[in-house]
């Protein structure tokens, strides 16, 4: 009899420990809810502790387990401390969702050095440090793990609208995913990425304001997707049944890349 059920598609995360960055709003908050609903113990990490505590209370009320951890994505000590705090509460982190990110919304030649450093820190340095810290602990414990990095369709396409550095960091995240997947394959640590298009989030709320309103009418499917429509992709990448998938970047853009062909 085969050791694999038919179909081999379990998304049960019972006994798993997840750390989600940028969990105070938008995609990160949704990712945390979904992982908890599937049985994972979830550390909610971001700067806004009040929001994290409210989300943790919501998850616990629904029967899940969650821990609010205040974390600054630009502070290496804070990142490492977040992993340590999660491990102390729940055990070794074996799911990392590197979701925290920030836009630049400026032309490259107009950016201050301070903003350049902040964008690079939040979007690239922070995810790198966290991935390495989680992997280091998994390797020491002899456990497999899943790391999901949030890239962007800006990795594939940039139209010159004033987010050049953001696009560069998201390409770096995609390449980081590929490189670390190779480095850690021997340890059964899978590293993958999701590259979302325009989804409803706190980040896009600000973008819509700058654009003068919701751009749904200009998109091929006349809608801006919501975070719930990314659940299945996240679960696919962290579930037991995707054990052979590593080094992939999955684009989810609801056909938005087709807009120039309309």
Image (spheres, helix red, strand yellow):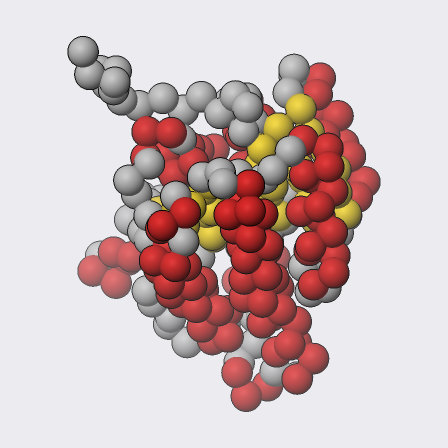
Q: In which image quadrant can residue 207 be found?
A: bottom right
Above or below, 7 relative to 96: above
The residue depicted at 54 percent of the width and 66 percent of the height is 124
Screen quadrant of the N terminus: top left
Q: In this figure, what is the number of numbered marks?
A: 0
Above or below, 163 relative to 215: below
Q: Nearer the viewer, residue 24 or 215?
A: 24
Q: Nearer the viewer, residue 163 or 13?
A: 13
In the picture as drawn, the residue positioned furthest to the right comes out as 50
Q: Which percent across, then down, holds residue 117?
A: 64, 76
In the picture as drawn, the residue positioned furthest to the bottom comes out as 109
Q: Which percent across, then down, holds residue 22?
A: 63, 49
Above or below, 160 relative to 9: below
Q: Which percent across, then down, holds residue 134?
A: 57, 49
Q: Nearer the viewer, residue 35 or 196?
A: 35
Q: Is residue 79 visible?
A: yes
Left or right, 212 with respect to 3, comes to right
Above or below, 239 relative to 215: above
Screen quadrant of the C terminus: bottom left
Q: Which percent across, then down, holds residue 260?
A: 25, 63
Q: Is residue 256 visible?
A: no
The residue depicted at 50 percent of the width and 75 percent of the height is 165
The residue depicted at 69 percent of the width and 55 percent of the height is 80
In the picture as drawn, the residue positioned furthest to the top comes out as 1
The residue depicted at 36 percent of the width and 34 percent of the height is 236
Q: Nearer the viewer, residue 165 or 178?
A: 178
Left or right, 193 with respect to 53, comes to left
């Amino acid at each position: 009899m085969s050791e694999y059920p038919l179909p081999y598609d379990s998304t049960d995360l019972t006994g798993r420990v997840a750390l989600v960055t940028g969990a105070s709003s938008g995609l990160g908050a949704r990712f945390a809810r979904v992982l908890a609903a599937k049985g994972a113990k979830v550390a909610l990490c971001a700067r806004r502790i009040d929001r994290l505590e409210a989300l943790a209370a919501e998850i616990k009320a629904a029967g899940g387990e969650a821990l609010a951890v205040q974390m600054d994505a630009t502070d290496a000590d804070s990142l490492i401390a977040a992993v340590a705090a999660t491990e102390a509460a729940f055990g070794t982190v074996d799911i990392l969702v590197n979701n925290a990110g920030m836009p630049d919304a400026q032309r490259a030649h107009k950016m201050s050095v301070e903003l350049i450093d902040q964008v690079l820190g939040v979007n690239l340095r922070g995810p790198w440090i966290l991935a390495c810290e989680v992997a280091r602990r998994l390797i020491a414990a002899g456990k497999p793990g899943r790391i999901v990095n949030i890239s962007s369709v800006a990795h594939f396409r940039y139209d010159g609208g004033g987010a050049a550095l953001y696009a560069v960091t998201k390409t770096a995240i995609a390449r980081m995913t590929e490189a670390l997947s190779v480095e850690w394959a021997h340890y059964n640590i899978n590293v993958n990425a999701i590259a979302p298009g325009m989804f409803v989030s706190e980040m896009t709320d600000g973008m819509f304001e700058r654009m003068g309103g919701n751009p749904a009418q200009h998109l091929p499917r006349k809608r801006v997707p919501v975070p719930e429509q990314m659940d299945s992709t996240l679960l696919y990448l962290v579930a037991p049944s995707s054990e052979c998938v590593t080094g992939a970047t999955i684009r989810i853009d609801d056909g938005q890349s087709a807009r120039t062909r309309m």
